[in-house]
Image: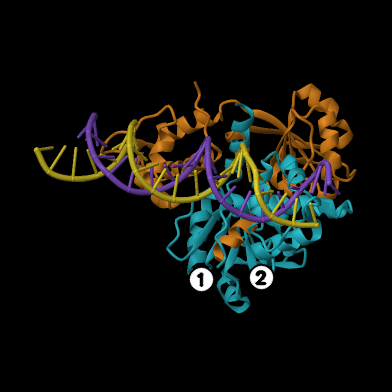
Chain colours: A orange, B cyan, C purple, D yellow
Amino acid sequence: MDKKISDKTINRLTLYHCILNDFIESNINTITSVQIANLLKIDDSQVRKDISLLQNSGKSRVGYYVADLKKAIETTLGFAHPKNAFIVGAGNLGLALAKYDNFLNYGLNVLALFDVDPLKVGVTINKKEVYHISKLPELAKQMGVQMVLLTVPRSVAQKTADFLVNSNIKYIWNFSPSILDVPKGVEVWNENLMGNFLHFSYKISN
Amino acid sequence: MDKKISDKTINRLTLYHCILNDFIESNINTITSVQIANLLKIDDSQVRKDISLLQNSGKSRVGYYVADLKKAIETTLGFAHPKNAFIVGAGNLGLALAKYDNFLNYGLNVLALFDVDPLKVGVTINKKEVYHISKLPELAKQMGVQMVLLTVPRSVAQKTADFLVNSNIKYIWNFSPSILDVPKGVEVWNENLMGNFLHFSYKISN
DNA sequence: TAGATTGTTAATCGATTAACAATC
DNA sequence: TAGATTGTTAATCGATTAACAATC
């Protein structure tokens, strides 16, 4: 009976997770809902309510044990089941993401990169090889990869997405500023970096 | 009497904006709320309600003029008032962002990069020079920059943020997976890439 | 005209906040 | 013990959806 956790709650849980990492680094063992709330500038009962969705419990007068709470968030959000993925587009953003070792800690295992540019093919980035895009269908099948981080330019995003769909890719984390039209059964997550900026920009000028 | 537009609405407006760009490229002049809703898999009255917040009006039986609607979104979200910014951290992500020319179209003008690594100082990326971090306070004052895109490693994020605050930076777009503790008057926007992935990851496995 | 689409109000749904008893 | 903090219920607030009259 997993209660479905809302988008906003998940987002907050990941922010709590960041804070817990900081506390661990500072060797602090416990944290209260008020401390978390103050750092994120939200309500403390919000924090307690979010935490109540986890397999975890706090202690009156003490708060929560940092290590336990961290583990509880990881369990609930499923860091435990790593997902294999490819990066498609070995441009700057693609390379930056390939070097992001942090991903693995959070259950995302990037196995290889793909590009159309022959100059990029064969290069190895952070132990991940860059292959020609034509190799993708075969390798995806071999390695059982269903997820792609899409970092190609806007102009070829839809075309590339169509190719990925034909290659049996089911999950696309889309970093290009483009809305992809995909068939049922394929999930797209739009990173929408510009959108995030505008969001920030609007917020600070109002 | 600018009605305050909610976070979620802003996010959707930026997604509509992406769609409108696609329509313009395909030389399509009009679009209906139902078309937008289908692409984003949301309710069509949601779309109409969002659009009603803009300086824009649709036409019965026709829909919205793509070009007008695009302009209306830009006006409301303030693309019109560009903001100058620095990138702090000339690693892979910093360089990727520096090459992101798209930013300028959306009102974000990146003027320079900063790093501690002497090997990186002096390099020019996409017409933006990399300076030593020690030059930041002076240049920020000279150029009137109050915003920073923070792309340093997690381990030095808080230390760097403290330095930025002392240098009179007021707005930090934080790309490091770390919650920054900043004084009142300074705004932080957490990009939280890992959080977004977990969000996606949780969604697709439930 | 007939019918498609907007714009908007009312109804529903969900998320946040307030409050406080239970706990250690 | 006294008091700080959780866990949870009830109250409030805001966002989404449904419905439909107005419009072209």
Q: Label 1 marks which chain's residue? A: B
Q: As rendered, which of A158 and A93 lies closer to the eye? A: A158
**Residue A39 visible in the current orientation:** yes
Between disc 1 and disc 2, the foreground one is: 2
Q: Position of residue B132 (x, y in %)?
A: 62, 67
- Please tell me in which quadrant of the rendered image residue A133 appears: top right
- Please tell me in which quadrant of the rendered image residue B24 appears: bottom right
Q: Position of residue B14 (x, y in %)?
A: 68, 53
Q: As rendered, which of B187 and B50 lies closer to the eye? A: B50
Is tag 1's residue or tag 2's residue first in the polypeptide sequence? 2
- Please tell me in which quadrant of the rendered image residue B197 appears: top right
Residue occupying image coordinates x 63% and y 65%: B86
**Is residue A202 shown above or below A149?**
below
Residue named by callout 2: B81
Residue occupying image coordinates x 41% and y 41%: A47
Q: Label 2 marks which chain's residue? A: B
Residue named by callout 1: B168
Label 1 is placed on what type of residue?
A: Asn
Identify the image quadrant of the C terminus of chain A. Answer: bottom right
Label 2 is placed on what type of residue?
A: His
Q: As rendered, which of B138 and B147 lies closer to the eye? A: B147
Q: Position of residue A171 (x, y in %)?
A: 72, 32
